[in-house]
């Protein structure tokens, strides 16, 4: 253990130099861990936002010119729509999964006397399909054609409450709807984006906008393992002669998004790794200086019987102490860095204290220790292989 004590003594003697070397390791650990925590938080945030649509297959009219059916209904947000016959075919091939037809448009509306008109998205959904698709934050589902639901963001932005009335069209030309419920926030979604929208009944929508077709169809798949089969069955049925519909598997889209975020996380962590490599070069430089300053001391040790491996271990102990202490300090500061960057970029810290985020601190600390030991190997080897006679003569 005498060589361990000598290693600690040398660090104490050159405390300022050693502290500056450790500072590089601290910065590297904080950079790697903070970037990793941010990347993981982004993935979890997106995953939570999309959790309600990962079980869906979405069918839309093919916009390539040859597919789909042209609808004459006023208010349609798309010139190409899906007919009732299309819906029945899709419903049949996707059974026993639920097929939900969706109508949508944008329109002007007034939310109260003296208030300016606004333009917002309006969905038309069958009353029986809504409970399986949307969760309410307050109120109840619409029971009549005069009732509607509004998204949570829509309600907050326009001070809309359960019982409020919304006049649709310029000067209420399309009638009015009474808000019966407010939809729980869904975040990003591929099926129906309801946060800033109004959801009316399908019957009201069809009568008001003279529609007998659909803009999209959402299939809620009960068994996630069947998503690919459902998608394939719909494509075979609907696109036999020409491309009539486009079929999107939301799970595949989510996997692509998560893969992209994973690559971003790896990239930003690699940037943090560069600072760690710079710190490693600093450790190498300091260790080489230490060997040069202690050549005579090494010669005395060798002359009184110290083995090469013992001299080498002494210098590796120094590198390890710098790495361990710097990594521990960096790990602690990474919590503060992760907290700050999560608050700033994600507006929340709820993803910080979970295993998949905290593991990045472990990665940073481990990398810091390994870099220090690797950068200490050559100086330690050089010290161990000094000729004892030449070392004693060194001035």
Image (cartoon, rainbow, N blue to C red):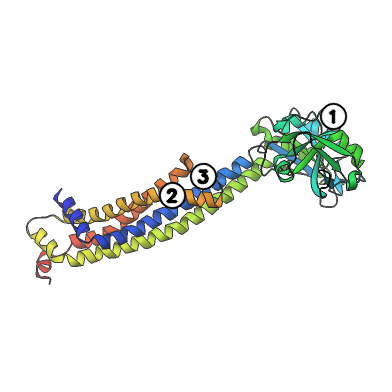
Disc 2, SS: helix
According to the picture, the residue beneath numbered tag 2 turns out to be 336
User: Viewed as shown, does residue 331 lie left or right of 45?
Assistant: left
Gap in angstroms between the C-alphas marked 3 and 1? 42 Å
Does residue 211 show up?
no
The quadrant in which residue 312 appears is bottom left
| Circle 1 residues within 10 Å: few <14, some 14–19, many ≥20 | some
Give residue 248's position: percent from left, percent from top. Answer: 72, 43
Camera-side residue of 165 and 362: 165
Image: 325 above or below 50: below
| Outermost residue to the bottom | 395
Residue at 12% across, 70% down = 394
Of the numbered discs in the image, which one, if any, rests on residue 349?
3
According to the picture, the residue beneath numbered tag 1 turns out to be 144
Camera-side residue of 102 and 221: 102
Q: Classify the position of the C terminus by image quarter.
A: bottom left
**What is the total number of numbered labels drawn onto the structure image?**
3
Camera-side residue of 39 and 376: 39
Disc 1, SS: loop
User: Viewed as shown, does residue 45 lie left or right of 274?
Assistant: right
Q: Earlier in the sequence, mark 3 or mark 2?
A: 2
Does residue 6 show up?
yes
């Amino acid at each position: 253990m005498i060589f361990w004590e000598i290693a600690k003594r040398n660090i104490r003697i050159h405390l300022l130099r050693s502290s500056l070397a450790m500072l590089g390791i601290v910065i590297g650990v904080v950079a790697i861990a903070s970037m990793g925590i941010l990347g993981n938080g982004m993935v979890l945030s997106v995953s939570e936002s999309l959790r309600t649509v990962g079980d869906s297959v979405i069918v839309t009219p093919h916009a390539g010119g040859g597919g789909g059916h042209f609808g004459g209904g006023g208010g349609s947000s798309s010139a190409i729509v899906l007919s009732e016959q299309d819906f029945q075919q899709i419903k049949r091939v996707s059974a026993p999964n639920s097929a939900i037809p969706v109508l949508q448009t944008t329109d002007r509306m007034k939310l109260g006397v003296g208030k300016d008109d606004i333009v917002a998205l309006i969905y038309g959904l069958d009353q029986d399909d809504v409970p399986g698709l949307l969760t309410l934050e307050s109120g109840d589902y619409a029971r009549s054609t005069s009732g509607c639901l509004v998204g949570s963001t829509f309600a907050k932005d326009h001070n809309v409450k359960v019982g409020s009335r919304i006049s649709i069209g310029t000067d209420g030309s399309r009638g009015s709807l009474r808000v019966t419920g407010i939809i729980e926030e869904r975040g990003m979604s591929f099926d129906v984006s309801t946060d800033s929208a109004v959801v009316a009944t399908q019957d009201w929508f069809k009568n008001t906008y003279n529609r007998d077709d659909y803009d999209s169809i959402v299939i809620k798949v009960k068994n996630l393992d069947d998503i690919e089969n459902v998608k394939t069955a719909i494509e075979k049925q609907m696109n036999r002669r020409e491309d009539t519909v486009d079929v999107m598997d939301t799970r595949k889209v989510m996997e692509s998004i998560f893969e992209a975020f994973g690559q971003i996380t790896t990239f930003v962590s690699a940037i943090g790794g560069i600072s760690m490599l710079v710190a490693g070069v600093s450790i190498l430089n300091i260790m080489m200086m230490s060997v040069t300053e202690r050549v005579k001391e090494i010669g005395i040790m060798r002359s009184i019987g110290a083995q090469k491996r013992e001299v080498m271990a002494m210098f590796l102990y120094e590198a390890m102490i710098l790495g361990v202490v710097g990594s521990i300090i960096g790990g602690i500061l990474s919590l503060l860095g992760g907290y700050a960057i999560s608050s700033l970029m994600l507006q929340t810290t709820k993803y910080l204290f979970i295993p998949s985020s905290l593991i990045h601190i472990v990665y940073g600390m481990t990398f810091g220790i390994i870099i220090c030991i690797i950068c200490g190997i050559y100086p330690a080897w050089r010290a161990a292989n000094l000729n004892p006679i030449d070392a004693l003569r060194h001035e």
